[in-house]
Amino acid sequence: MRTTKQSMHLGAFLVHPRAHIKPSGCTDTNAQHIEPFKFYEHLARTAEQGKLDFIYLADSQAPSPEPLTFLSYLAGITTRIGLAAAVSTTYYEPFNLAREFSCLDHLSGGRAAWKVITSGSEAEAHHFNQDQPPALQQRQNQAQEFLDVAYSLWDSWEDNAISANKVSGIFADPTKVHELNHRGEFFAVRGPLNLPRSPQGRPVILQDANSDTGTLFAAETAEVVFTTSQTLEDAQRFYQEIKSLATAHGRSADHIKVMACIYPAVGISEEEALQTIAHLQLTNASRLVCGSPSQIADQLEEWFVKEACDGFVITPPNSAGGLTDFVQKVIPELQIRGLFRYEYEGTTLREHLGLSRPQSRFQAAHASSEVLHAEEVHDGKIK
């Protein structure tokens, strides 16, 4: 049980405007004629109006924009909200992806996030000159090595590497820009990255934890974990498990945020919300949260206060207006209760989430080496 009032974290999933197709073939009529890219712009602006931590764009076989390209565009029409993209490690190279996310972090002033996923569908394999996707264990092993290489690439420039010395003509101190010379099971990468270190140091890492192996991987590396737990008790068990595993890996439990995925159906009353659910045939969706704004706020507050999660990822059940309803009707309820911010207090996604900016692993090693050298000189061991 949380003993003090804290602010929950909120993110929004950018659903396709025609995502809610009924079995009968009918769609949400308000979304049938919306141009997809303008619709995503509307969702991004709405989410930022509500002071949400981030928006999240998945990558799938369904008609949808390429996430990193489109989030780079959204970086130009937003100012504070975090920009998260799901990108697979299965059919990518670490250098390319690390460079693209670093560029997004620079463009957005420190708002980039990467949801690490793998690709297990045969349809995707056929797009990348493969008959079958790699086996699950291989995909997971590859993802772990991929992420480690990406960390090293993002860290390959120390924060103070750029000198831009006009007299010497030296742009960057070569002792503070590091080659990786990585050679592993799946990747061989020399490095360094050809971009200086970005505002956040590295993007915020998001992951699902829908298997034992996935949970262990998330506990070791993720900073935001999505959970689809359906009951309060299941969510509380997962919350304690992931935090304990993170601590066992030498991490602070506060440095991994658990966010529950919800479908909030907002109505003037509970009856109206239930009518919306019936109309969109969402009775079998993951976790539905429905009712009046006050009733929905009650349910979110219970999960948050009872440590079932640190916040929520919102999937609007009505693509045309569901996020607007949540922002305009539910968020004010949460703000009045002291559960959510009125204004952004920082400029980067890490600041929104209360996460520290990581030090470059090379800079940390460099600093340790200098301290050791100074101590040896002081002790008279260096002649």
Image (spheres, rainbow, N blue to C red):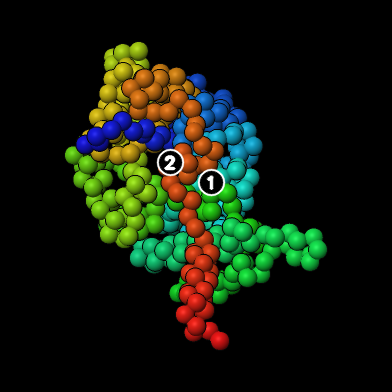
Of residues 30 and 378, the one nearer the viewer is 378
Residue 70 versus residue 117 in the image, above or below: above
In this orientation, which residue lies closer to the viewer: 250 or 323? 250
- Residue 174 can be seen, yes or no: yes
Q: Position of residue 140 (x, y in %)?
A: 38, 62
Marks 1 and 2 in Cβ contact (< 8 Å): no
The residue drawn where x is 48% and y is 51% is 357
Residue 38 vs residue 241: left or right? right
Between discs 1 and 2, the one toward the N terminus: 1
**Residue occupied by mark 1:** 112
Residue 254 as seen in the image, left or right of residue 61: left
- Which amino acid type is marked by label 1? Ala
Q: Amino acid at mark 2?
A: Leu
Which residue extends farthest bottom?
383
Quadrant of the rendering where the C terminus is positioned: bottom right
Q: How many marks?
A: 2
Determine which quarter of the picture holds residue 4. top left
In this rendering, the answer to whether 234 lies above or below 281 is: below
Compare residues 10 and 292 and report the one nearer the observer. 10
Look at discs 1 and 2 and give the one toward the viewer.
2
As drawn, the residue found furthest toward the top would be: 268
Q: Quadrant of residue 212?
A: bottom left
Relative height, residue 289 to residue 159 (above, below):
above
Q: Position of residue 250 (x, y in %)?
A: 32, 60
Q: Quick check: 121 above or below 380?
A: above
Question: Please, which residue is most extreme toward the left here?
Answer: 233
Q: Which residue is mark 2?
A: 353
